[in-house]
Image (tube, rainbow, N blue to C red):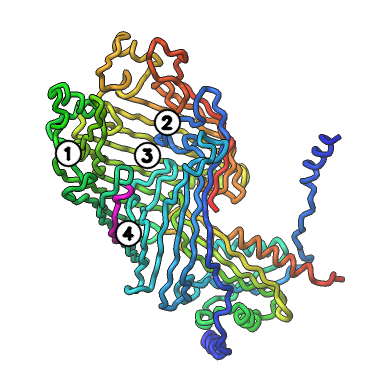
Amino acid sequence: MRLLALALGVLGAGCIARVPEVRLAEPREVSVLYVVDGAREAGVSAAPEELQRAVGAALSRRNLVPRVVPLDEVAGGFTRVRESARRWQELQRRGGAAPLLLLVELDAEFFSHLQGRYRWQARARITAGKPSGEPATDALNFPVYVNFDHEQVPAVLSTAAPTVADRVGALFDQVLAAEPPQG
Amino acid sequence: MRALSAALLLCLLPAAARADAPRDRFTLGGYFRVMARPDLQGGDGRLGLWNLSGRLLNEGPYAALEAKLDILQDAPGRSEPWAAVHAKVEGGSVQGTDVFNGSLTQYRVSQLYVRAGNVLLDGVVWQLGTLHTYFGDLGLYDLRPSDLLFETVGLSARLNRPRFEAVLALGDSGFFLRGASGYQAVPTVAGNFRFRAIPGRLELGVGGQYMVEPHVAGSRRAAYQTPGISYEDYARREVALRFLEANPTLDLLFPAPAAARADSFKLVGYVGFGGFGPVRWNNLFVNFLKRHPDAPVTEVAGGRTFTVHVTGFTDERYQVNAGNELQLRVIPDVLDVNWGVLFGHHVDLDDRVRATENNRTFVSTVVRAQGYVTPTVHLLLEGSAAREESHNGNLYRLHVDSVFQSARGVSDLRGLEYGDARVRETYQLKGGVVFNPAGRGIYNRPSLRLLYGAQYSNVHAAFGSGFVESLDDANLFRGPERHWHHVVSIEAEGWF
């Protein structure tokens, strides 16, 4: 009997409910602003293409259509102001008519050469929501390993792309799940 | 104009303190490798003897923890000093996986240093403490031919610019080199320079390290050579015995040691290129080094312990080592291949009588292919061929009863050789299923692996084992010859 219970328990583990991905019935535009901050140096730079593609794919799975706000338009001010709330306000102004906004702030700092791999510490702060109202936020602080010395911040953030994209998707699942049912 | 107005608007907002989330002051990273490898052929769970055949299945358990604490955190773009302390503990034992059963005696504090910047010189990062540095490593072999300052504690200055990186260091290697026999200062100077000729495409590097042991008159720990003795007597540990035979009752007149020069060096070179076609990256490392002389040895003869100083017998040990690893993306998202080559030529100009690993040449090649069934389920296949040749006679045993093969069963009790062959050849083939939760990539981790490996060697039992090596007729544990070795492994490896 105990063996049977154990077997059922093991088999049942595969039936543990997972939070489903939200997929909208109609496509909806998202204004996205990526900002990569220098960990030690001032200045901001654009997120690597690979990370933008991964985040774009996570949004597309939810029937969200990303429209990237060029960093050039805000880079000067963002260099001096790192406060996410103010950056969100700026995105609200520049988000156009998009019904949803996404701000992805990233940075990466070298940790050490550990057992043959280059360990970096990456950070991401994700803010998502509607142009009006309180946005939802998520913050990540996680290690990223790359193989070579020449792989600097862009390569590190490209390596981190799946992690960041997953969390962006999960955050939008929360944002969209909080909406009242349509129809 | 819009960008300008946005910048002005942001600057006009009330001056709040930096409101982005503060960085954690404490960060912990690490590495682990743990496996279950039941060895049904009497071995210790490793396929071969060392990582000349590639590290896969030839390595044991390992764990490392590295902590970083920001003592002074800096604000980005500011010029205030910053400082962080790093400490690393590592070792090669985990309970149930090796003979030490996770004993902490197998672990050590391998690194402890403070890094600081914006102090005295703009852009220079100072490191005080342990100083180990290297251009990169050969992942297939788990070797770092370009490493410097492994033995040294001291101070280094590192200047890192987009096109180059330069390191200059001063320190002391005495406790590492002389700790066991008593500390003697070994001042060390080293430096390396990496030139990023085409950033991300082509890099060149050179470096060097010099260690010298100044003679300290009156110190018994200083470098000396016992005069008037032969290398062969030293090799047999019979210096004192020969002296007493030649000078009975005059043991107090055993030759007094003479001051000797003890120094060593290492030169390293590096070429890295990649980022074109299927070539992800290629690392080529070369080094040329002279090993530091040994500490004195002791011998017991006639009921008395004699100290034999051997600086002059161990000060001409040179090595040339070169290794290359090519990483190829053969079919994107389907198949990656890494190809490694390793060469070593080691000579001991003092030792012309013994067969040892100080006088040998080795060459090896390893190829690993990893195919991606799905992003997380991979198939791995690795093959290797290695050849080691002794310069000073036989060093390897081809047969379980090699004495009958090499000397017609008559053992040479005075011999300075070990076996019946100068050459050891080893071939390995390993393969299995790899589960990589983090996705594709030969070096992507964590990895959960189910592997099988087979080794063939011309040498008998070319793997760590519990076999009795004695050729004594009274040996109760005489076994068959073993040229093949098979290992099955369930293992996990990861960085965090």
Chain ID for label 4? B
Residue at numbered disc 4: B154
Is disc 4 placed on a helix, strand or loop?
A: strand
Chain ID for label 1? B
Q: Is residue A167 above or below residue B407?
A: below
In the displayed structure, does residue A52 sit left or right of residue B347? right
Is disc 2 placed on a helix, strand or loop?
A: loop
Between marks 4 and 2, how big is the CA–CA gap?
35 Å
Q: In this view, does B132 lie above or below B366?
A: below
Span shown in magenta: B167-176
Circle nearer the N terminus (4, 3): 4
Disc 3 marks a residue whose amino acid type is Val
Between marks 2 and 3, how big is the CA–CA gap?
18 Å
Circle nearer the N terminus (4, 1): 4
Query: At which x and y percent is residue B9?
Result: 56, 89
Marks 4, 2: nearer the viewer: 4
Residue at numbered disc 3: B341
What residue lies at 24% left-to-right and 48% top-to-bottom? B265
Residue at numbered disc 2: B49
Is disc 1 placed on a helix, strand or loop?
A: strand
Disc 2 marks a residue whose amino acid type is Leu
Residue at numbered disc 1: B225
How many marks on residues?
4
